[in-house]
């Protein structure tokens, strides 16, 4: 029960981009509606930002977590505008537009017109060495194949194999799309990951034809700042947006470096213990921290990973849908080199590695070529990725073994033998949520149950409707509006 005439006490669990965005838009929405709220952000880490972690070292700008975001997803651009950061946005090097895919230990440029692994320009696709002629002909059968009549979700990999064949799926789409989720395409939900694929099939009768249409329509709708390239970041690194959100939320209380131990539903408890009702006043919930502090909460925004959220909510309600969201562990290895000893010039942004190649790395970004602000002119910066669904153990190797495996792979693929000036390893355990087939229905069912059994508790973040930074920001904004609309 809310206190009449008093501000709503809202506890945001999680200080990553989802939690910070939720808090920021709760503050903005409350101001717009003329409502008064009291915000508290809780995170077990000692600093805000979650996986966003920019390291400034020896003139390098190094991202230890995510390194950029899709320009076509506008939620983060809108947020940057609201925070006064538009001038800090920067796009990829226009001279490094090529991206390669490793095939039979050779780097092949991705054909022009490839959109999310789907060929939209036929002539360049027919010239690529990434798939056989049989694979190319199978892909072009997409123009003639009938659309699926069965309604409902299916796996992303199953959809792609059905429309454009197994070669396109495993040799082009899988390394490209799985890089976003570090996932197994045969287990990921198409409706939760790339619903535009299924929509293209239904609307245009062909995946390729639909993506051709979307490509033309999409670029026309983008604002000027998003038209310079596929990806954007901030000149000072992604921590720029975290710092700006931190400043904008200066009035919100923080509890950092301490984890939530329990969420207590006081209304339920008060029904059993009438004396406690007098003790806790009118707060519906109490958020108990591991240090013993108790935070009264009229509303709770849960942005923790699904497995942590499940641990906290399971004593109060059924959370089987949260338990169905598995996470993959990954690592990234960043290496800096002296250009004078490096012995290689890049003409693109990096390359992707299909599972069939049998390497430890899943991709390599030529960071100093892709992002000109990240390195001094006389230096080179590389970032290699390790770990994906079904192959996570390599991400957990001891430092020396992990570095040796990565250096062996870059020697095999690019002939690089130069000694790094330094190496930075980042391990992100259980960091990549996997959306199973039926995920959207699961989330809808879970939210309906929470609304009925735990009113005022809202779940949001990467585990639910998109893992990218813009997706998390959009979900935070949606959560803020939904929460304050109920109060």
Image: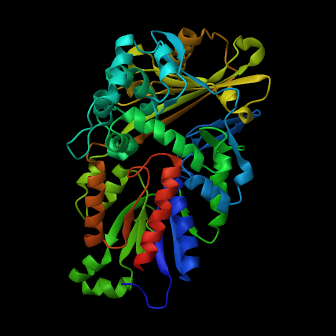
Number of on-image labels: 0
Residue at image position (28%, 32%) is 158
Specify the color scheme: rainbow
Q: Which sits in the foreground, 185 or 414?
A: 185
The answer to whether residue 147 is seen in the rendering is: yes
The x, y position of residue 111, in whole percent, is 52, 22
Classify residue 286 by image quadrant.
bottom left
Q: Residue furthest front?
A: 144
From the viewer's perspective, is residue 110 above or below residue 331? above
Residue at image position (42%, 40%) is 432
Residue at image position (40%, 27%) is 174
From the viewer's perspective, is residue 314 above or below residue 365? below
Classify residue 27 by image quadrant.
bottom right
Q: Which sits in the foreground, 67 or 72?
A: 72
Classify residue 109 by image quadrant.
top right
The x, y position of residue 486, in whole percent, is 40, 77
From the viewer's perspective, is residue 164 above or below residue 260? above
The x, y position of residue 91, in whole percent, is 67, 39
Q: Is residue 446 left or right of residue 124?
A: left
Q: Is residue 114 left or right of residue 271?
A: right
The answer to whether residue 14 is seen in the rendering is: no
Classify the position of the N terminus by image quarter.
bottom left
């Amino acid at each position: 029960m809310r206190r009449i005439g008093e501000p709503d006490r809202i506890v945001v669990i999680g200080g990553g981009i989802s939690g910070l965005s939720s808090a920021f838009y709760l503050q903005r929405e409350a101001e717009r509606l003329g409502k008064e709220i009291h915000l508290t952000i809780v995170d077990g880490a000692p600093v805000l930002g979650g996986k966003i972690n920019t390291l400034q070292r020896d003139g390098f700008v190094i991202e230890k977590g995510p390194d950029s975001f899709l320009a076509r997803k506008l939620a983060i651009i809108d947020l940057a505008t609201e925070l006064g950061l538009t001038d800090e946005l920067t796009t990829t090097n226009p001279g490094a537009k090529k991206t390669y895919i490793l095939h039979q230990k050779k780097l092949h440029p991705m054909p022009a017109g490839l959109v999310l692994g789907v060929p939209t320009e036929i002539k360049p696709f027919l010239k690529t060495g990434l798939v056989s002629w049989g694979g190319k002909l199978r892909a072009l059968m997409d123009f003639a194949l009938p659309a699926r009549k069965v309604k409902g979700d299916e796996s992303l990999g199953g959809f792609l194999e059905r429309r454009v064949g197994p070669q396109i799926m495993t040799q082009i789409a899988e390394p490209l799309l799985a890089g976003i989720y570090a996932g197994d395409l045969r287990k990921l939900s198409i409706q939760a990951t790339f619903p535009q694929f299924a929509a293209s099939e239904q609307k245009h009768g062909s995946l390729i034809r639909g993506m051709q249409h979307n490509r033309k329509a999409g670029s026309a709708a983008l604002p000027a700042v998003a038209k310079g390239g596929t990806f954007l970041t901030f000149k000072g690194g992604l921590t720029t947006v975290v710092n700006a959100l931190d400043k904008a939320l200066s009035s919100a209380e923080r509890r950092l470096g301490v984890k939530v131990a329990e969420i207590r539903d006081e209304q339920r408890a008060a029904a059993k213990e009438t004396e406690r009702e007098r003790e806790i006043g009118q707060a519906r919930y109490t958020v108990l921290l591991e240090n013993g502090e108790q935070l009264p909460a009229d509303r709770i925004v849960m942005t923790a990973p699904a497995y942590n959220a499940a641990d906290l909510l399971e004593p109060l309600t059924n959370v089987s849908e949260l338990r169905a969201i598995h996470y993959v562990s990954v690592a990234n290895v960043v290496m800096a080199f002296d250009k004078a000893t490096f012995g290689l010039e890049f003409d693109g942004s990096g390359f992707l590695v299909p599972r069939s190649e049998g390497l430890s790395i899943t991709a390599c970004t030529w960071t100093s070529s892709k992002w000109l602000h990240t390195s001094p002119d006389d230096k080179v910066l590389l970032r290699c990725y390790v770990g994906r669904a079904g192959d996570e153990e390599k991400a957990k190797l001891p430092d020396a073994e992990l570095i040796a495996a990565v250096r062996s792979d870059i020697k095999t693929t690019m002939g690089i033998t130069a000694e790094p000036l330094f190496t930075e390893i980042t391990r992100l355990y259980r960091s990549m949520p996997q959306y199973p087939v039926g995920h959207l229905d699961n989330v809808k069912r879970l939210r309906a149950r929470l609304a009925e059994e735990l009113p005022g508790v809202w779940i949001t973040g990467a585990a639910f409707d998109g893992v990218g930074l813009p997706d998390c920001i959009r979900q935070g904004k949606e959560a803020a509006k939904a929460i304050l609309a109920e109060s």
